[in-house]
Amino acid sequence: MDVERKFRPGERVRVMKAYPLGHVRTPYYVRGCTGTIERLCGAFPNPEELAQMRDGLPARPLYRVRFLHRDLWPGYGGDPADVVEVEIFQHWLEAA
Amino acid sequence: MTDRGSYQPLTYFQLMEVSLRELLVEKGVVTDAQVDETLEDMRRRGPERGARVVARAWTDPEFRKRLLADGTAACEELGLDVPALRLVVVESTPEVHNVIVCTLCSCYPRMLLGLPPDWYKSRNYRSRVVREPRIVLAELGLEVPGDVQIRVHDSTAEMRYMVLPLRPPGTGGWSEERLASIVTRDCMIGVAVPEVTR
């Protein structure tokens, strides 16, 4: 059984501000930032576990989260509507 | 004495590659022929595969819908096998311009675009396109109008992205082949837009 999904498209989420060692697929520049769930990509084995030669199961929900550039970078100079979308596993997200 | 040409010592990574490959062959994990075949296969794949997908989406609205809903399945429909590629196709419109990157490494839709260009893998592009996309795009020769939203797609985990560019005006009645000819690799990364040369 896959881990149950907690979020739906349109919901606001915050990325955990954590810095564990190892093979982590959550880029630094979004940690601690708030965005919106764009879609669910599916459920996939946890890459942090796979990198340690374990099976990474149960599979975990993976989302695409949309962030406004101006929420990521103070003084962003482009269009205030510009966004970046990043794939983030559920265990890195909390409701915002 | 035999002429050895200009001898260049192997770099660290070349040496690692040769050592690993020879060990795998020696231990019977893979054969030399399989390695050659895989390399040949990688060389054969180029951006014309992605261009075919784009041209079909421009001419067939139903295909376009299926492509945006499930990129992998739609490519398989065209007979393009995309193993290990969970493809998300993002559509550029008059209001939205899409561009792809992988800030963590160099994830790239190789099955449709072939090998990535060196600049795509550079630290410069990867770190800056998520921070100042308009400046990076301008440096690459693409000025995005201020009222067009920019959407940067960072392929950080399982999915791979390809941009479905906006079909340029002046291409009405073109065949799929002719349309595909103006869809370059850079258009499908999102650092260029298709142009009609007069």
Image (tube, rainbow, N blue to C red):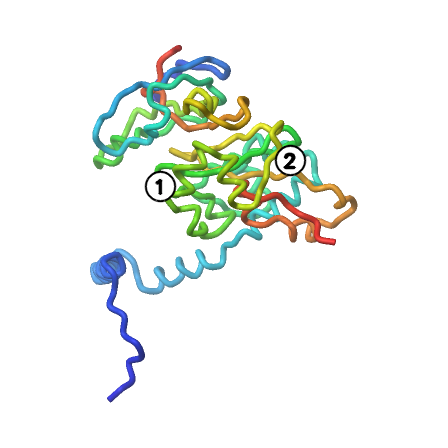
Q: Chain of mark 2?
A: B
Q: x and y percent of residue A69 in the render?
A: 46, 25
Q: Chain of mark 1?
A: B
**Residue B64, numbered circle:** 2
Q: In the displayed structure, would residue B150 be above or below residue B36?
A: above
The residue lying at 45 percent from left, 50 percent from top is: B116
Q: x and y percent of residue B100 in the render?
A: 48, 38
Is residue A8 left or right of B144 when viewed as pictured?
left
Q: Amino acid at mark 1?
A: Cys
Q: x and y percent of residue A80 in the render?
A: 53, 22
Q: Which residue is mark 1?
A: B105
The residue lying at 36 percent from left, 27 percent from top is: A29
Q: Is residue B28 visible?
A: no
How far separated are the C-alphas under marks 1 and 2? 29 Å
Picture quarter containing residue B165? top right
Camera-nearest label, 1 or 2: 1
Crowding at dot 2, Cα within 10 Å, few <14 / some 14-19 / many 20+, comes out as many
Q: Amino acid at mark 2?
A: Arg
What is the number of callouts on the image? 2
Position of the C terminus of chain B by quadrant: bottom right
